[in-house]
Amino acid sequence: MKSYDAFRPILAIESSCDETAAAILRSPGIILTSLIASQAEEHARFGGVVPEVASRNHLLAIDPLVRRALEEAKLSPQDLGAVVATSGPGLAPALLVGASYAKGFALALDLPYLALNHLEGHLLSPFLGEEKIPHHIALLVSGGHTQLTEVRAASDYTVLGRTLDDAAGEAFDKVAKLLGLGYPGGIEIDRLAATGDPAKYPFPKALMERGERENLDFSFSGLKTSVRYFLEKNPHLAKSTDGMADLCASVRHAIVDVLIQKTARAVESSGLNEVAISGGVSANKALREGLRELCQTKGWKLHLPAPELSTDNAAMIAFAAIHHLKAGESSPIGQEISPQWGVGR
Ligand code: KG4
Ligand code: ZN
């Protein structure tokens, strides 16, 4: 197998959940193309992602998507320097499609193959295009994960706290389902919350007590249960526009306030002064605004991913991969997928 040639662009493939994505990136972080084929509509009628449906749709989408990516970048497969695929965490039948395609591609062209961690892709996404990853505290909030991490440099991560049950995005999606909104519901709650009163219904915020050692873990499953009981007692609220706006604003506040306060505690106890957020929930307006205000008050530098890099995409996978490839790493062609793969010590 050829070794990685840093002068050639790399192809990255992402298929860990319900988006098939392909991107071509030139080192250190120039996106030549980044394409996403979303299957969200296919899953909406089931109210969540169905792994086998995801797998079949990835299979249909992946080859045309990669061909289109090469066309848009005006490249032929022979121009590439490496092929990367998300290998976990994620849905096994979905991961298998992207990883197998990428390995076949690398094998046929005798290119280095790299299995990349999806969470690492999110973690580094706010720095896409920048030469250096600063020492900072990162809040990663997606549909599957909620994690506070100290990032010292690319590949050097310590987990400070994580969710003990539902992820923040999952909490948004589950409450949205209770409210009769479509899937994925986070974005809908965010939209409807715009005209609501966040203080109207004080939903519970778990694990907020301050101890000797700051508790930086999260728990969101109680919120969903509390909203369910509340709706059973007050079914009329979800039927009126104003009631719905107040409910959405209150739920959004309950989730976002915990995320902001815990991020503030993590930064304070680390003594650092740079913060980054990433993952699908980082598109949330209240979270972005709240963190902006916090960082302004404290004099911290805030790093946000571009909106199109917040939710799942392959450009972030390519960018994170560059750091590994430059360090001389690659994966064997027989590398298995890792559906439970975590990131950080
Ligand atoms: O990172 P992502 O695309 O996929 C995973 O790796 O999970 O995140 C998807 C999650 C979903 O739960 C979705 O509801 C949530 O991100 N999300 C939002 C918003 N946009 C997407 N949650 C709250 N507010 C938003 N604006
Ligand atoms: Zn993701």
Image (spheres, rainbow, N blue to C red):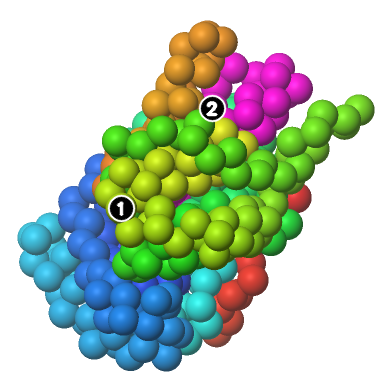
Residue 156 visible in this rendered orientation of the protein: no
- 260 or 252: nearer the viewer: 252
Q: Position of residue 119 (x, y in %)?
A: 53, 55
Compared with 92, 136 (above or below) is above
Give the class, few, some or many, for how many residues have Cα within 10 Å of label 1's Cα (few <14, many ≥20). few
Which residue is rendered at x = 42% and y = 75% of the image?
48
Residue at 59% x, 38% y: name it.
202
Q: Is residue 24 visible?
A: yes
- Residue at (51% x, 78% y) in the render: 91
Q: Choose the circle earlier in sequence order: 1 or 2.
A: 1
Q: Which residue is mark 1?
A: 240
Q: Quadrant of residue 103?
A: bottom left
Q: Is residue 274 left or right of residue 156?
A: left
Residue type, numbered disc 2: Val
Residue 268: say if magenta.
yes
- For residue 275, the mark is 2
The span picked out in magenta is 259-281
Q: Residue at x 66, y 42 (%)?
A: 205
Question: Badge 2 local density, few (<14 within 10 Å), some, or many (20+)?
Answer: many
Q: Position of residue 191 (x, y in %)?
A: 29, 45
Q: Nearer the viewer, residue 147 or 331?
A: 147
Q: Which secondary structure, mark 2?
A: strand
Q: Helix, strand, or loop for circle 1?
A: loop
The answer to whether residue 181 is above or below residue 52 is above
User: In this picture, is 325 found above or below 292?
Assistant: below
**Marks 1, 2: nearer the viewer:** 1
Q: Are marks 1 and 2 in contact (CB under 8 Å)?
A: no
Query: How many numbered marks are there?
Result: 2
Report the magenta stretch's main SS.
helix
**Viewer-closest of 243 and 49:** 243
What amino acid is labelled 1 in the image? Ser
